[in-house]
Amino acid sequence: MSRKPFYLLIFILISAGVGYNYQRHVNDGIPFLPGTSQTTWTVEARITFNGQGPVEASFALPTDPAFQTLSESAASPGYGLSMSYEGDARRATWTTREGIGRQELYYTANLVPTGDLTLDEIAEIPTPEPVVWDEGLDTAAKAVIDKAWQKSASNTSFAREIAQAVSQPEQQQNVALLLARYEPAALMSRLVRSAGVPARQVYALNLEDGRRRQALMPMVEVLDKQQWHLFNPATGAQGRDDKLLLWQRYSTSVLDLAGGTNSNVSFSMIEDTRPALATAIDMMESGGLASLSLYNLPLEEQSLLRGLFLIPIGVLVVVFLRVIIGLKTSGTFMPVLIALAFIQTKLLTGLIGFLLIVAAGLVIRSYLSNLNLLLISRISAVVIVVLGIIAGFTLLAFNLGLTEGLTITFFPMIILAWTIERMSILWEEEGAKEVFVQGGGSLLVAVITYLAMDNDLVRHWAFNFLGIHLVILAFILLIGQYTGYRLLELRRFRPLAGEKS
């Protein structure tokens, strides 16, 4: 029979699991490592003006691919507020009929850096609008443009030459003449557009922790091969760093005010650090993906699933130890359930409790075997006895002040009863040695399984990256195809190896 369909299934499972986990990290922002921190910025814009009656204030909101808005709010007592899109631009509009005297409006945004510093591409290149220069300045502008054009080979390099010329006016008299009439950003934008290159003036905010009353910084974006490139005319630099927030890009103004005078916009900002996982969850909620997340479930169900999602990890460990290593256990997956109990009781307390319960149960089971009971009656009696033993040990631990012993109630009674029954039968049929071999193997596998499951990284991946369970399934299927010798069985061939040597 061909094995190709089987290996195709394995490939599909691993690919789907890895792909899903990658998507969870890249698109949803779930960190690969638990305890990872995420930097966030709280930026507050303060708008002040003198109101003269009915007021309408329209304010540009940040639109930057390098930052995602986690949450936003506005404080504007007595004002109506609406947030809407005007083309690609997002704006907040405050309105009131009684805006008399000094007015203050506040907008606060919590922003999360995305690391995407590239500006958006456009499908259709716009045609630059004609630029009209004041009389007497057109000749100077043409000279600056011609000089930069000769030194460039593309729109980007041309804009770079213009930016450097504007930032160093002392080296060119024509630039100094133009700067006497225009601000650096406005001048650079006009010079670039005069050469037929699409450009626009934007406003950015330089993020610095704890800064107050900061103003927006004018910059220029230049289009080259459908990609925008950012320039700072004040320094002549191209590009940006990860602490530069582009606040206004698409709208024509930062603030449009009707019914007020002497307006001013200032910014304050605070840098904060919070768990990256909490940030990712909040971002999913703000993006409408909460209904598809396990974190949308009630906390009780989340806690239950966190424990259940550890079972595939334990199952993989048990399969590997039994099929590849060759350890013997009492029951197939009893060590997994015991390991889950160890997670609740902690390892040392769980080991002591398990040994005490099983030992006491074997003594009582030996008496029940003399009564010649039916299997169902005998098992039922053992279950009740195990319950009594657990209750007795719990009371004893409480009276002795051993609070750790109270967690012994987390042991699964049915599993313990079956374990006692199996070991008792094994004792009668195979002897005490086989009981210690399988019982010791079960405890060893349970301890190893516990160590694999009780790990922050494993817990994090098992709950947040569900694709890992597809990968585990693929590995279990592969191990299930193994028909070779187990590692512990190789001891039988050691004498042969000695004779050969």
Image (tube, rainbow, N blue to C red):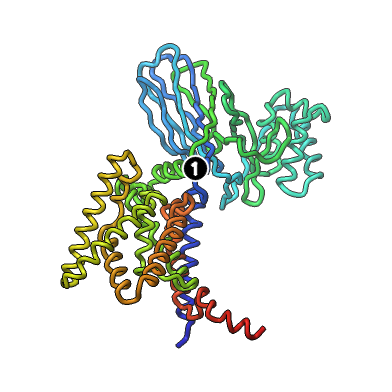
What residue occupies the far bottom of the structure in this picture?
A: 1
Number of callouts: 1
Please say if 444 is above or below 70. below
Q: Is residue 10 visible?
A: no
Q: Position of residue 199 (x, y in %)?
A: 64, 40
- Residue located 50% across and 52% down the image: 25
Q: Nearer the viewer, residue 326 or 92?
A: 326
| Displayed quadrant of residue 184 | top right
What residue occupies the far top of the structure in this picture?
A: 101
| Displayed quadrant of residue 468 | bottom left
Please say if 382 is above or below 484. above
Q: Position of residue 171 (x, y in %)?
A: 83, 30
Mark 1: few/some/many CA within 10 Å (<14, 14-19, 20+): many
Q: Is residue 345 visible?
A: yes
- Residue located 71% across and 30% down the image: 234
- Residue located 75% across and 31% down the image: 167
On-image quarter of the C terminus: bottom right
Q: Secondary structure at mark 1?
A: helix
Q: Amino acid at mark 1?
A: Ala
Residue tagged 1:
276
Q: Nearer the viewer, residue 310 or 113?
A: 310
On-image quarter of the N terminus: bottom left
| Residue 146 shown left or right of residue 97 in the figure | right
Q: Position of residue 157 (x, y in %)?
A: 74, 45
| Displayed quadrant of residue 336 | bottom left
- Residue located 48% across and 57% down the image: 21
Please say if 260 is above or below 364. above
Q: Position of residue 311 (x, y in %)?
A: 38, 60
